[in-house]
Structures are given as C-alpha cells and as structure tokens.
Amino acid sequence: MKSVRVQFERMLGEIKVRVIFRRRGSSSSRPSAGAGGLQPSRRLEDFLAECCVIGRGRYTRASDLRSAWERWTGGTVYDSGMTLVQFNVALRRAGLRYSRSRRDGEGVQFRSWEGLSLKPKSARRAA
C-alpha cells in the first residue's frame, strides 16, 4: 500500500508543478536545449516534481536547492543548460519566492526559496 501512496504523491507533485509552470507562462514550444535533449524549463519541472514538495509554508535553503539540482542533473548548474541567473528566474516563474529573511536556530540569516521543500534523500533518484 505504501508504494501506491508514494506513486500517488509523485503524480500529484508532478501535476502541481506542471500547473504552476503553465500558469506562469512557461512555454513548452521552445527548441530543446540543455543536457539530455530536454529544454531547461522541462528539466526544472521534472526536478521539482521528483525532488521537491510544493506548498505554502515550505522553504529550503537556496544553496541546498542548488546542490540538489546539480546532483540531479549530474553536473553544475551551468552543465544543465541554464546559468545560475536563468535557474533563479525559472524558479520565480514557477511561483516561488526568493527570501533573505530566514534565520536558522542560532539566529544566523540565510537565503531561501519559499514555497517548496526538498524531499528526503531516500525519496529522490540519483542522476
């Protein structure tokens, strides 16, 4: 029963990500680019659906998200077909908000992306 639940949650996450991208005007008719022949926005959609949970009240450190993206694509953010700026713009288009006002338990400020959290490593696939 657990595998059915996991599959359902994965499908629901994919649907949420695709709806968000469609609302934000991400076009899927652009020529393909990036590693693996997929256009960068499509690869980002797949990454968000597979490795992240989208929702209000969720956040993740910007550096952790970038590291997870690099591990997922098998290289640096530049190897994925997007520069760091393009990566950040694509996240904003997906409805996520960049913040510099989060603080950890010790009061140290850090940069974060609001509106998503990373799934546990056990729930993510290797590149």
Image: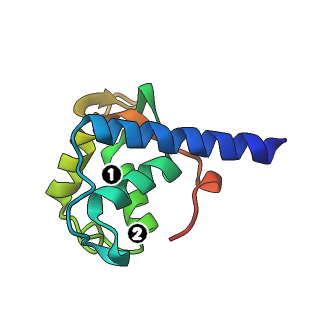
Q: Mark 1 vs mark 2: which is more N-terminal? A: 1
Instruction: Name, please, the residue furthest toward the top.
Output: 57
Return the residue at label 2: 73
Residue type for callout 2: Thr
**Residue at left 58%, top 56%?**
124
Residue 17: quarter of image = top left
| Front label number (1 vs 2) | 2
Q: Element type at marker 2?
A: helix
In the foreground, 42 or 27: 27
**Residue at left 34%, top 58%?**
42
Determine if residue 40 is in view. yes
Residue 78 horizontal/vertical position (percent): 23, 70
Residue 103 horizontal/vertical position (percent): 33, 29
Residue 18 horizontal/vertical position (percent): 40, 43
Q: Element type at marker 1?
A: helix
**Tag shown at residue 121:** none
In the foreground, 11 or 100: 11
Residue 13 horizontal/vertical position (percent): 52, 40
Determine if residue 112 is in view. no
User: Would you call the spot at circle 2 few (<14 residues within 10 Å), some (14-19), or many (20 or more)?
Assistant: many
Instruction: Name, please, the residue furthest toward the left.
Output: 85
Q: Is residue 37 above or below residue 82?
A: below
**Residue at left 31%, top 42%?**
21
Return the residue at label 1: 63
User: Would you call the spot at circle 1 few (<14 residues within 10 Å), some (14-19), or many (20 or more)?
Assistant: few
Q: Is residue 63 above or below residue 38?
A: above
Taking 7 as reference, is 69 left or right?
A: left
